[in-house]
Image (tube, grey):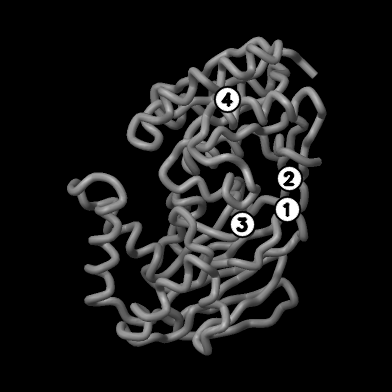
Amino acid sequence: MSSEITLFVNPTAGRGRGAQAAQPAAAALRAAGFQVRTVVGADADDALARAREAVAEGTGALVAVGGDGLVNLALQAVAGTDTPLGIVAVGTGNDFARALGLPIREPGVGGALVAEALKGSLVRDVDLGRIGDHWFGTVLASGFDSRVNDRGNRMRLPLGRFKYDLAIVAELATFKAVPFKLTLDDGSVREVAATLVAVGNGTSYGGGMRICADAEMDDGLFDVTVVGDCSRTELVKVFPRVYKGTHLSHPAVSVYRASRVELAAEGITGYADGEPVGALPLVAECVPGAVRILTRTP
């Protein structure tokens, strides 16, 4: 393994925490004897091109310093390769790191963990979801949650998470269940009026909302959470339970497990790792051991 490590940085993650976090993360890696090269792109396409170049040149690891958006970008560079991915989670949501039990918003600790994992070859093979040629690590969201994302992305103010809180309130006022068609890998088809459908490789999205609370990242299967037709009043009551994962016992909630899922619905955009991946219909496949993650235990 090369002693040169590539630090892949989003300086705007977590309202500027990414730029600040790069320094203690780099310091921890250098203190462990690694050479550190930093990659910051002019935009997402440029950043991904630079990350892919580093991987092609044989970097010892790609270490993403940022939130779920940057981790998702890093996955596009390392998935299906032997290059391990380290994560220094300093974004707003950090759901991929959260699912793996990695430090959150502790860049020095995160950098030291990556260095220790590199020295001890502590690498965990983790499944990823794939939609066409696009990889994702946590959840493919569709329905109410993706419409909240649509609305929040259109809003210029306020900044931060409060914008999405307002988007939730606005969507609740008008939202109706959507007719979904789900086709699973066993060929079974389910047509259901649903509030949302979440295809989980990981457990959570939105900064700890455990929508697919029982998902395992190394079992070769998605957990598909379907929230059926709920009244606004019932949805408001059930919603807080998502943070503990206890919503899964609600009568309106069904969970399926599959390695391949096709989702179809009119007028719905899919979001994977919080990033838009296109209008439904979409096909998601679970690819076992698609990425090597630097972690506490192999």
- Determine the residue positioned at 60% across, 50% down: 137
Label 3 element class: loop
Label 4 element class: helix
Dot placed on the residue nearer the N-terminal end, 1 or 3: 3
Dot placed on the residue nearer the N-terminal end, 2 or 4: 4
Amino acid type of disc 3? Answer: Gly
95 with respect to 216 (left or right): left
Dot 4 alpha-carbon crowd within 10 angstroms: few under 14, some 14 to 19, many 20 or more? many
**Residue at mark 1 to residue at mark 3: CA–CA distance:** 13 Å
Say which residue label 4 marks: 51
Quadrant housing the C terminus: top right
**Residue at mark 3 to residue at mark 2: CA–CA distance:** 14 Å
**Residue at mark 3 to residue at mark 4: CA–CA distance:** 24 Å
Dot placed on the residue nearer the N-terminal end, 3 or 2: 3
Circles 3 and 2, Cβ within 8 Å, touching? The answer is no
**Residue at mark 2 to residue at mark 4: CA–CA distance:** 17 Å
Say which residue label 2 marks: 290
**Residue at mark 1 to residue at mark 4: CA–CA distance:** 22 Å
Amino acid type of disc 4? Answer: Ala
Say which residue label 3 marks: 202
Amino acid type of disc 1? Answer: Val
The numbered mark at residue 287 is 1
Dot placed on the residue nearer the N-terminal end, 3 or 4: 4
